[in-house]
Image (cartoon, helix red, strand yellow):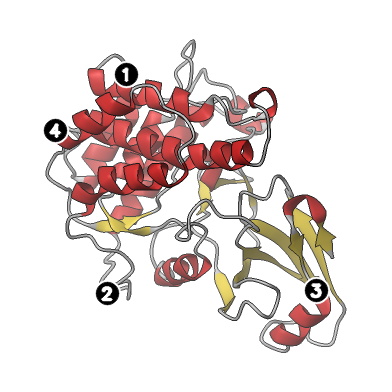
């Protein structure tokens, strides 16, 4: 099958030959169905079905902003390391490091029974007493459990470079931005200077998700309200886990507040506040969040650089600003990052 919009082709016959009897249902017809085929800037997902069994195949997008993006092997290593831990995650089944099979490396994992709350929240959650509050806190609890995992014992040495992790962040992301810069961004000079001048001591190294938000988790489809899985681990690394909680809280929107991105979200009333979520993380993880504004600002700065790559690529391809859906993303993210840095948003 082919998805022209995303530039992705999947030869189901070749895939079936590669899988063989390593998954159940060998000898039965295999089918594939593309999930959420969008613009091609995100990892491509397919439902794979054979003999009454189904899985999800995940492969990189057709186009990357940076060579380090959408790293399927990294995701495979992390998911395998999380087996047997208290961190909810999809069960990874197979990994193919040969891009000649379907045109890219790929991973096959179990289907998660759940919903993505960053898009919409089912009525039963809203109608459950404290349902939204518990849902918000479940995001925090997922990060608490992740930070507890012994990444050395789990075989993740070499996944990242925790030594000097925070010290490298600003220069790394400025360097990436310079690689595709097409315009000046508001607050960039202030943010780069402030982030370098106010960098706190790094929290003890742990597994980081790298893009943790309600769009990258799945909640269970039944009561009690809880996480079913943390998904999309291709930007995971070993580093400062406070950047994950900073990312979650920086993108968290209070009722009546303009968010850092214009994205569909569920109802806001009933969710915990950023202050309540930070207190829960600090209490349950034992980690010091006194420098939380730094991590909130850094997380939005990083995300702004990443999304500016999408704007730049479209701009260089001749897409006019009036049609470039990423035109406001990085400027808005940098502006809100500066608000956290200045203490104007907490």
Question: Residue at 52% of width from left, 17% of height from top?
Answer: 269
Residue located beneath label 1 in the image: 339
Q: Quadrant of residue 312?
A: top right
**Marks 4 and 2, the one that precedes in the sequence:** 2
Q: CA distance from mark 4 to mark 3?
A: 52 Å
Q: CA distance from mark 3 to mark 2?
A: 38 Å
Residue located beneath label 4 in the image: 197
Which secondary structure, mark 1? helix
Question: Residue at 39% of width from left, 26% of height from top?
Answer: 334
Q: Looking at the rendered structure, which numbered label has been put on residue 153?
A: 2
Q: CA distance from mark 2 to mark 1?
A: 39 Å
Which mark's residue is nearer the viewer, 1 or 4?
4
**Marks 1 and 3, the one that precedes in the sequence:** 3
Mark 4 nearby-residue class (10 Å; few <14, some 14–19, many ≥20): few
Q: Left or right of 322: which side holds 190?
A: left
**Marks 2 and 1, the one that precedes in the sequence:** 2
Q: Is residue 120 above or below residue 215?
A: above
Q: Left or right of 262: which side holds 246?
A: left
Front-most of 188 and 234?
188
Residue located beneath label 3 in the image: 11
Assign the N terminus to one quadrant of the image: bottom right
Q: Is residue 54 above or below residue 112?
A: below
Q: CA distance from mark 1 to mark 3?
A: 48 Å
Q: Quadrant of residue 50?
A: bottom right
Pointer 3 and pointer 2: residues touching (CB < 8 Å)? Answer: no
């Amino acid at each position: 099958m082919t998805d022209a919009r995303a530039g992705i082709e999947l030869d189901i016959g070749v895939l079936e030959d590669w899988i063989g009897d390593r998954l159940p249902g060998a000898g039965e017809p295999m089918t594939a169905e593309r999930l959420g085929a969008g613009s091609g800037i995100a990892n491509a997902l397919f439902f794979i079905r054979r003999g009454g069994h189904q899985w999800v195949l995940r492969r990189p997008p057709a186009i990357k902003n940076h060579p380090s993006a959408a790293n399927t092997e990294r995701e495979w290593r992390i998911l395998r390391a999380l087996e047997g831990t208290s961190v909810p995650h999809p069960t990874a089944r197979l990994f193919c490091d040969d891009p000649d099979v379907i045109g890219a490396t790929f991973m096959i994992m179990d289907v998660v029974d759940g919903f993505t709350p960053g898009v919409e929240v089912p009525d039963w959650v809203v109608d459950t007493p404290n349902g939204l509050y518990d849902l918000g806190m479940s995001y925090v609890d997922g990060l608490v459990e992740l930070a507890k995992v012994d990444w050395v014992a789990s075989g993740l040495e070499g996944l990242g470079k925790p030594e000097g992790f925070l010290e490298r962040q600003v220069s790394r992301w400025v360097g990436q931005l310079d690689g595709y810069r097409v315009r000046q961004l508001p607050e960039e000079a202030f943010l780069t200077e402030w982030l370098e001048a106010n960098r706190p001591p790094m929290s003890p190294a742990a597994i980081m998700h790298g893009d943790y938000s309600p769009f990258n988790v799945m909640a269970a489809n039944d009561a009690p309200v809880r996480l079913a899985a943390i998904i999309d681990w291709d930007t995971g690394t070993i580093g400062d886990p406070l950047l994950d909680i900073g990312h979650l809280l920086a993108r968290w929107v209070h009722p009546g507040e303009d968010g850092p991105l214009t994205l569909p979200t569920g109802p806001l009333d009933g969710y915990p506040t950023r202050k309540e979520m930070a207190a829960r993380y600090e209490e349950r993880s034992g980690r010091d969040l006194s420098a939380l504004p730094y991590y909130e600002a850094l997380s939005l700065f990083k995300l702004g650089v990443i999304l500016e790559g999408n704007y730049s690529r479209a701009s260089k391809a001749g897409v006019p600003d009036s049609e470039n859906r990423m035109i406001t993303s990085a400027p808005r993210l940098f502006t809100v990052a500066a608000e956290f840095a200045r203490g104007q948003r907490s």
